[in-house]
Amino acid sequence: MNKKTLCLYFQVHQPVRLRKYHFFDIGKSHDYFDDFANRTIIRKIAERCYLPANRVMLELIRKYGKNFKVSFSISGLALEQFQQYAPEVIASFRELAKTGSVEFLAETYSHSLASLADEKEFALQVKQQAALIKTLLGYTPVTFRNTELIYSDRIGEMAAKMGYTAMLTEGAKHILGWKSPNYVYTNALNPKLKLLLKNFRLSDDIAFRFSDRSWKEWPLTAGKYASWLADTVRNGEVINLFMNYETFGEHQRAESGILAFLSKLPEHVFSQTDFEFLTPREVVAKHQPVAPLNVPFPISWSDEERDLTAWLGNELQTEAFRELYATREQVKKSADPALTNDYNKLQASDHFYYMSTKHLSDGAGDRAFNPYESPYEAFINYMNVLSDFIVRVNEKTEKSVQGKKAGKIPPAKKTGKTAKK
């Protein structure tokens, strides 16, 4: 009997948060980031989520061997902060990597929106993140997951051009129509790229509704959930459960029973269903695509609309986005490590998310980490930082130009002859 497939994927990302940066700091201070807040938040989430959840994953792999598989995408900014504030988190992911039951995915280094702005920057960031995964975890990514599951035909084509053969995205209703997310599809422009689509209803049951006592299905048990999986896939081949890893212990606190639920889920999946756990690379190796998926305009995981408006839905966001990427060529030409490092950190999608004026119908867990009281405050703070950053970039460019001009002045020629009088 051909088993059905269950694919578990978890996103691990933390932005480098900005300090309160005033207008009068511009030109005087280049210290943009709140080291105390960043350390505090990383340590807190490490203790509540990353370390205990990784222990559960390791226990499940040891219990079920190659029968239990899981996958992660970890942003470069998160890895940087783990190295600085919580190296034991990297050690725990390294231990998972050694089991052979875990796949690590490629994504943008900065968890950025670069795929919407600059193909060169997009490709560079993906290459940087994959290199860091290889260095820290000994794994070479072959599957791609873009920031916020953002995807379009064109973005998929760019991923395929980078050599990726599989990509994750959202099973958006307005794209699928009558089709099911529970199959493998292909990119409409390059059929070599296979697509895995998130089953958002089943994913969100865990990520957003698990501890909601007003939810008619509360409390959600592993046995009940396994029965839902079996019912859902009667006319499908694969269920992709994609969510933020912070679901386990941070967005849904340990006292809600979320870690116990995670620990018991495989037991019920194996006893109640005919599913097998596979990683994304294994899913696309096993299942043939059923059709190309046409996505002319970008989609994402966010809101009922599954579009880009959580990050680029108002004039504040689009202005900040435009100003940021207008500096890209100058930053790269500068070859200045400090500017490049700051530029990476300023690209995190979170900075634009904080400026959103939408009432988000989901994603409430992410809002818990919003350090601003209003979108306008987020915009002003970010633009103050960006203004100072642009001043530094311009100064570096001017110095470089002046240096080149000075270098072009030819020295006096020595002819070896005495001048005629």
Image: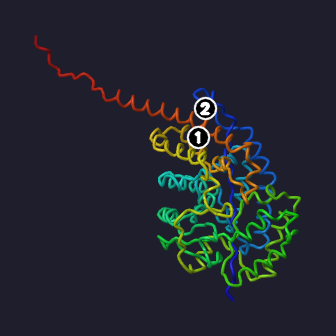
Residues at marks 1 and 2, CA–CA distance in whole angstroms? 10 Å
Disc 1 crowd rating (10 Å Cα; few below 14, some 14-19, many 20+) is some
Disc assigned to residue 30: 2
Disc 2 crowd rating (10 Å Cα; few below 14, some 14-19, many 20+) is some
Q: What residue is shown at x 27% (from left), y 26% (from top)?
A: 410
Foreground residue, 203 or 165? 203
Kind of element beneath mark 2: loop
Left or right of 316 on screen, residue 394:
left
Foreground residue, 379 or 394? 379
Figure quadrant of residue 144: bottom right
Figure quadrant of residue 280: bottom right
Left or right of 114 on screen, residue 10:
right
**Mark 1 or mark 2: whose residue is earlier in sequence:** 2
- Residue, disc 1: 342
Residue type at mark 1: give it.
Asp
Q: What residue is shown at x 70% (from left), y 53% (from top)?
A: 90
Quadrant assignment for the N terminus: bottom right
